[in-house]
Image (cartoon, rainbow, N blue to C red):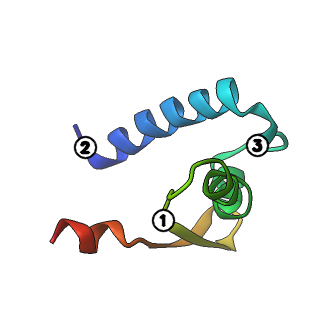
Amino acid sequence: MPVADLLEVYGKYLFGRLTGEHSELVKGIHSKFDMMLNIEPAIHTEARKLYQGANPPRFESKMVSENEMKLTIRTEAWRMLQ
């Protein structure tokens, strides 16, 4: 499966889970860009509060244009795998 297709399938799955289990976190999110812009301030911040020891990756997102976003993901998980 191409990476782009895999990411789209996973995104739909994840958004469905969030909508079902934590609908308050996805209020006002209407697009893929909205979702990416809100992962860190809304979703990952809450995950850190709810789940002791949770260490989700840090997302830094910035809109470059109407249809383009710059996304930087910082994670400690890769270091743990080595």
The mark that comes first in sequence, 3 or 1, is 3
Residue at 76%, 43% in the rendered image:
25
Q: Element type at marker 1?
A: loop
Residue at mark 2:
2
Q: Quadrant of residue 19?
A: top right
Q: Is residue 76 above or below residue 52?
A: below
Query: Which residue in the protein does label 1 denote?
Result: 57
Image quadrant occupied by the C terminus:
bottom left
Q: Nearer the viewer, residue 73 or 52?
A: 52
Task: Give 23 or 55, whichever is nearer the viewer.
Answer: 55
Question: Could you tell whether 25 is left or right of 7 in the image?
Answer: right
Q: Earlier in the sequence, mark 1 or mark 2?
A: 2
**Three-letter code, disc 2:** Pro
Instruction: Tell me if 30 is positioned left or right of 58 in this view.
Output: right
Q: Quadrant of the N terminus?
A: top left
Q: Nearer the viewer, mark 2 or mark 3?
A: 3
Above or below, 15 relative to 63: above
Structural distance between the alpha carbons of marks 3 and 1: 17 Å
Furthest toward the front, the residue is: 52
Q: Are marks 1 and 2 in contact (CB under 8 Å)?
A: no
Q: Position of residue 67 (x, y in %)?
A: 64, 61
Secondary structure type for disc 3: helix
Answer above or below: position of 54 versus 61. above
The residue located at (58%, 29%) in the rendering is 17
Horizontal relation, residue 77 to residue 46: left or right:
left
Q: Nearer the viewer, residue 24 or 13?
A: 24
Name the residue beneath numbered marker 3.
Answer: 25
Q: Earlier in the sequence, mark 2 or mark 3?
A: 2
Q: Residue 48's spot in the image, x, y percent? A: 62, 58
Task: Please state the horizontal and vertical placement of residue 5, each as a whole percent of the image.
Answer: 35, 39
Residue type at the position of mark 3: Leu
Residue 46: x %, y % from top left: 70, 53
